[in-house]
Image (tube, coloured by chain):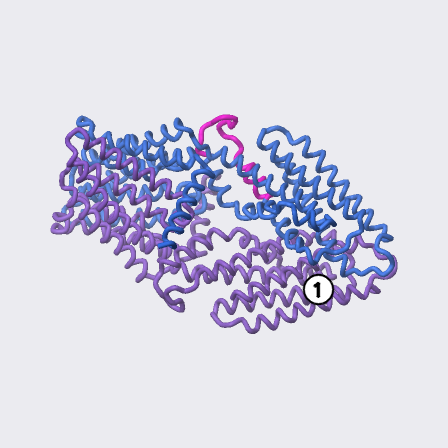
Chain colours: A blue, B purple
Amino acid sequence: RKNVNAGVLKFVRNVRKLGRDDPRRVVHSLKVGLALTLVSLLQYCQPLYDSFGVSAMWAVITVVLVFEFSVGATLGKGVMRGLATLLAAALAVGAHHVANQSGRIAEPILLGFFVFLQAVVFTFARFYPTIKARYDYGSVIFILTFSFVSVSGYREDEIVKLAYQRLSTILIGGSACIIISILVSPVWAGEELHNLIASNIDKLAGFLQGFGHVYFEIDEDLVSNRNKSFLHGYKTVLNSKNSEDSLANFAGWEPGHGRFLFRHPWEQYLKIGARTRRCAYRIESLNCHLNPHAKPEIPSKIRETCTEMSLECGRALKELALSIRSMVKPLAAYVHIEKSKSAAENLNSLLQSSGLWGDNTDLLQFVPLATVVSLLIDVVNCTEEIAESV
Amino acid sequence: RKNVNAGVLKFVRNVRKLGRDDPRRVVHSLKVGLALTLVSLLQYCQPLYDSFGVSAMWAVITVVLVFEFSVGATLGKGVMRGLATLLAAALAVGAHHVANQSGRIAEPILLGFFVFLQAVVFTFARFYPTIKARYDYGSVIFILTFSFVSVSGYREDEIVKLAYQRLSTILIGGSACIIISILVSPVWAGEELHNLIASNIDKLAGFLQGFGHVYFEIDEDLVSNRNKSFLHGYKTVLNSKNSEDSLANFAGWEPGHGRFLFRHPWEQYLKIGARTRRCAYRIESLNCHLNPHAKPEIPSKIRETCTEMSLECGRALKELALSIRSMVKPLAAYVHIEKSKSAAENLNSLLQSSGLWGDNTDLLQFVPLATVVSLLIDVVNCTEEIAESV
């Protein structure tokens, strides 16, 4: 019993955390409930029911399948569903007409052939990269509607009326979704993408600033007291490609909103995202040098320059994230990049004047430091690239 | 006109390439067509039509929505669709009964409230991580069926019969999908996952073997003649997390097949995959040192040891991939790992005997080499980790 109680308690805590982390989730659930209830209640209006009959169900189905978290996804799915249904219904009516003319026996064979053909073609089309990325849902709906209408027409002989009913109910359901998702506290995919990119850059900046302190700090107590959560923040950046891609896809469906005009250059965000990820790969390699036992002795001059490099680079990334957020040119970031580059050059000349290490140079000791240094230089270069594309 | 022609030609070439790259795509399309045609033709059997009526359509819809590329995905979706429909229909009948008892006016209000409530609860549940990962589709179907049945019941007063019809047609459609996807040249998600993991490791191995030759080779002509495609192969490994996760999820639904028993430890594959990716991040960092202008002078002894390290590590990975493919213990891989580790130790002692570099040591020149060396050592460590979890 105690186990069960603990399990329930944990579940409740998780659920509450889910809602508190992003209150828009709760709002979204309420929005879906609202749309669904509205559309369901349409059924109770006698005149509407008389004109649509059983087809009125399609409004309910449309709401459940089309309503998505962001406006872009809802719009995209709604429009695709409408267009695919229209196209498929038209073709199915045509196919049905052709089959009808061909006599009693040939009719089911011809219809079966048509259904087979379109299913094969559109299923295969779903493997085509551009179609898969943008029109996957549309293809499914096409296959569905075509089979549905062409086969049901055989029985009911009211095929045009059926197709018309389906279309108008889908229109009702789809527009209910779109209107509610835009009017009631909308979640814009474009804004999500914008914030995701900025916060990813922020996470890298947090790592670099923390790294500068932790790796090059001599005072062990100071290091162990420090909050080390920043060291894991960057890990989510490594696998962010898919969510960036789908957000950019949805964002393409959205009309202008807030500070974003229609046809905002969303691809640019993907480019920045890719570069941020490249930077994150370097940081992942850096991170495995944070093991405290393996820390080498470092001459203080080199230590200072390295710390400066890491800190300045972190500051530059912070500025970049800020300038993405506020959508201005990242002038302040360039200053920090310049500083970190001059720190890198300083470091180079320090290394060339080999007097630092005394006579009996132990190259082995130098290996980890050299690695860190060169990865940091890579990170600086990546940062510069990110800055260029902002 | 010429432009259009070229576009069409390119499209046709792309489509043919799509089919040739993976002929199972064509087979899959044919399978979907077959299932859909079979189910559609069921409609033409008079006795069947009489007992199911319009509900027979649900078989068609089920086939279109449930049939997926791999057996696991089809099975999972089919089972979820069946169970969710059963559960939702039962609850909806209950809700309808309660509402019915409450009088003419309260009935639509109560039903509306029920629909609202379940939509909110299940939409929110879809944000819960475990539900999102495994039961997302089931939740959607639950909302759909509940709204559908509880609302339509208000009109038709044949709610139990309707629910029964929906269930049995979904069963027909679902079992047609599952049977065809298992019997006609099945695509097992488990096998896909197995091959994906092995080929990812292979790609890393290819990179390391190539890297050993290209980076440490002195003869420039030899280098430029070499096929460099291996240098990009590893890039797909960086973003493979999502496809691995979903394949493992689907694989969990599959019964035993071929060399895989039921309850094969699919999580183990995810672990190997994560380690492979960590190794790939290091390799990504290594890759940016392949710029030929920046190549430093390297004493020949160090070069030899490094080449050996890289090659042995690559061989070890090759062996690992092979042993995953053939499902035996990776004994040969351990030999190569040992060799590459002893090469690393060799290198360490070489570096300690600092006589190699002459007197005026230019540490700056040493930085890139040190980086490569330490990244290679990291790669060796990662390889060892991968070997442990195979």
Quarter of the rendering containing residue B313: bottom right
Instruction: Tell me the subunit letter for badge 1.
Output: B
Which residue is nearer to you in this view: B55 or B3?
Answer: B55
The residue that disc 1 covers is: B306
* Residue B40 is a magenta residue: no
Q: Which residues are magenta?
A: A252-276
Quarter of the rendering containing residue B301: bottom right
Q: Is residue A390 visible?
A: yes
Name the quadrant of the N terminus of chain A: bottom left
- Residue type, numbered disc 1: Cys
What is the tally of numbered marks visible in this picture?
1
Q: What crowding class fits label 1: few (fewer than 14 Cα within 10 Å), some (14-19), or many (20 or more)? A: many
Q: Position of residue B300 (x, y in %)?
A: 77, 65
Which residue is nearer to you in this view: A363 or B45?
Answer: A363
Q: Which residue is drawn at the image coordinates 59% and 68% (left, top)?
A: B316
Q: Is residue A87 visible?
A: no
Drawn side of residue B99 relative to residue A244, left or right: left
Q: Position of residue B95 (x, y in %)?
A: 21, 40
* Residue A267 is a magenta residue: yes
Q: Position of residue A367 (x, y in %)?
A: 74, 57
Which residue is nearer to you in this view: A281 or B306?
Answer: A281
Q: Which residue is drawn at the image coordinates 52% and 45% (left, top)?
A: A241
Drawn side of residue A167 relative to residue B246, left or right: left
Quarter of the rendering containing residue B96: top left
Q: Position of residue A331 (x, y in %)?
A: 68, 30
Name the quadrant of the C terminus of chain A: top right
Q: Secondary structure at mark 1?
A: helix
Q: Which residue is drawn at the image coordinates 21% and 31% (left, top)?
A: B108
